[in-house]
């Protein structure tokens, strides 16, 4: 059976381009992401990443698995959101892009107000 956390790790590498960037996005170490993908490769008996210079490249099989992972992750996130909505608690992901100076000066009170609401 495929493990959702391992699929998330592979998906993150696909989205962010490197194991290091995927690890940062997931809040893991690069080693943890590499281990998750190695376990996924053993479970699927498929090579998913190929070393390319200092980085990695997803194989065709990995791209197929990422498409499936994207769908599964969306379903799980939708289920989590629906459960939270039933409890009357706002839920979901919030992505914010800003210059560092704006983020330091403007975002703390905005996020505090959002958390209170």
Image (cartoon, rainbow, N blue to C red):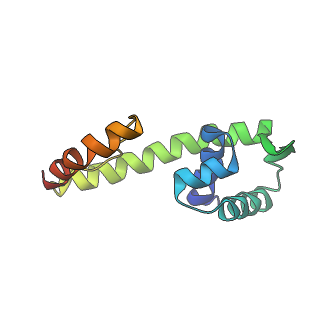
Classify the position of the N terminus by image quarter.
bottom right
Give whichever of 37, 43 is nearer the camera.
Answer: 37
Q: Which residue is painted at 60% across and 38% down in the image?
A: 15
Residue 62, image x and y in percent? 74, 42
Q: Which residue is painted at 36% across and 39% down in the image?
A: 101
Side of 9 relative to 78 (left or right):
right
Give whichever of 107, 34 is nearer the camera.
Answer: 107
Q: Which residue is painted at 76% across and 55% down in the image?
A: 44
Residue 11, image x and y in percent? 61, 45
Give whichever of 62, 107 is nearer the camera.
Answer: 107
Q: Which residue is painted at 12% across and 50% down in the image?
A: 117
Residue 92, image x and y in percent? 32, 47
**Numbered circles on residues, count:** 0
Residue 46, image x and y in percent? 82, 51
């Amino acid at each position: 059976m495929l493990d959702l956390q391992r699929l998330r790790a592979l998906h993150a590498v696909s989205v962010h381009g490197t194991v290091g960037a995927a690890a940062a996005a997931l809040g893991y170490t690069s080693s943890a992401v590499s281990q998750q993908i190695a376990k996924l490769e053993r479970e699927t008996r498929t090579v998913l990443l190929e070393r390319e210079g200092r980085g990695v490249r997803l194989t065709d099989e990995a791209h197929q698995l990422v498409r499936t992972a994207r769908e599964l992750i969306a379903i799980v996130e939708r289920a989590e959101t629906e459960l939270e909505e039933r409890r009357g608690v706002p839920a979901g992901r919030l992505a914010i892009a800003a210059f560092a100076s704006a983020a330091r000066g403007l975002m703390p009170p905005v996020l505090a107000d959002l958390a209170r609401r």
